[in-house]
Structure formats: C-alpha cells, structure tokens
Image: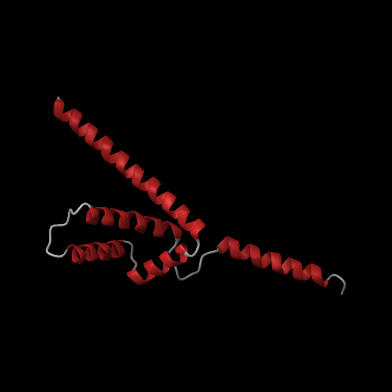
Amino acid sequence: MKNWWVIVLFLFLFACAAETEEGYPEDILPRDQFVEIMVDVQLVEAVGKQKMIRTDDPRLKLAGYYQETFDKHNTNDSIFFKTYDWYYAHPEMMVEVYDEVIIRLTEMESQLSRENEDQDSDNER
C-alpha cells in the first residue's frame, strides 16, 4: 500500500504522454491536409488582393474559389474552420503550420521563376 503513489504517478505520466503523442482531436483535419488547404487558401486570398477577379461581386467569386479549394481537399468549410479555430487556440502549432505554408509557397514561387527563366532563354534563341 505504501507504493500506491508510484502507481498514480505512473498513470499520470502515461496519460500525459498519450495526450502529447496524439495531441490532435479526431474531428479536425490532419496537419498535412490542413497545410495543403492553407497553401491554397493563401493563393485564393492573393488573387482577391490583386483584384485578378473580373466579376460584378468579387466576394462571390472568392467564395466560389474557397468552395473549390474545400472540394479539392475533400472537406468543407465547417471542418476547415473548426481545424483553424483549434490551431488558433494552439499558437505554437499554428506557427509551425504557417512556417510550412510559407516554405511551400516559396518553393512554388521558385519553381515558377525557374520555368519563366527557361521559357525566356528558349525565346531568345
């Protein structure tokens, strides 16, 4: 009976370890999928900010782009925003997500730059 606190301590440590290993609720998007969606969302927002949309109501067009993004990733706005809210409540993890988003967007930009340079050099010949 003297060692009951060892058992309680062991159970407590085990419970804490299990929570940090899983760490994510089951009803939010997996981190990788959330990052992919956030990349596409950033692209949609960039289109909106650059006013590249030619329509009477750009907000309606953007809403359509967001819906296409959610459809592309087999999700919906409710699940996306629930995931976003969860990450917002966990700022350290949100920073990691945004870091990954920035890395992917930078890679996309580099790829496009290389393709444009290749195309320009082909046109000069």
Which colour assignment does the render follow? secondary structure
Q: Say whether residue 101 is left or right of residue 90.
A: left
**Whether residue 32 is situated above or below residue 60 in the rendered picture:** above
**Whether residue 124 is situated above or below residue 25 in the rendered picture:** above
**Which quadrant, please, contains the C terminus?**
top left
Q: List x then y, in percent, for residue 26.
A: 49, 69
* Count of all numbered marks drawn on residues in the image: 0
| Residue sitting at x 51%, y 65% | 24
Q: List x then y, in percent, for residue 96.
A: 47, 53
Picture quadrant where residue 27 is located: bottom left
| Residue sitting at x 21%, y 51% | 50
**Which quadrant, please, contains the N terminus?**
bottom right
Q: Say whether residue 52 is left or right of residue 21.
A: left
Picture quadrant where residue 82 is located: bottom left
Q: Residue furthest top?
A: 125
**Whether residue 80 is situated above or below residue 95 in the rendered picture:** below
| Residue sitting at x 55%, y 63% | 23
Q: Say whether residue 39 is left or right of residue 65.
A: right
| Residue sitting at x 78%, y 69% | 7
**Whether residue 109 is situated above or below residue 7 in the rendered picture:** above
Q: Residue furthest bottom?
A: 1
Q: List x then y, in percent, for residue 92.
A: 51, 56
Q: List x then y, in percent, for residue 33.
A: 40, 59
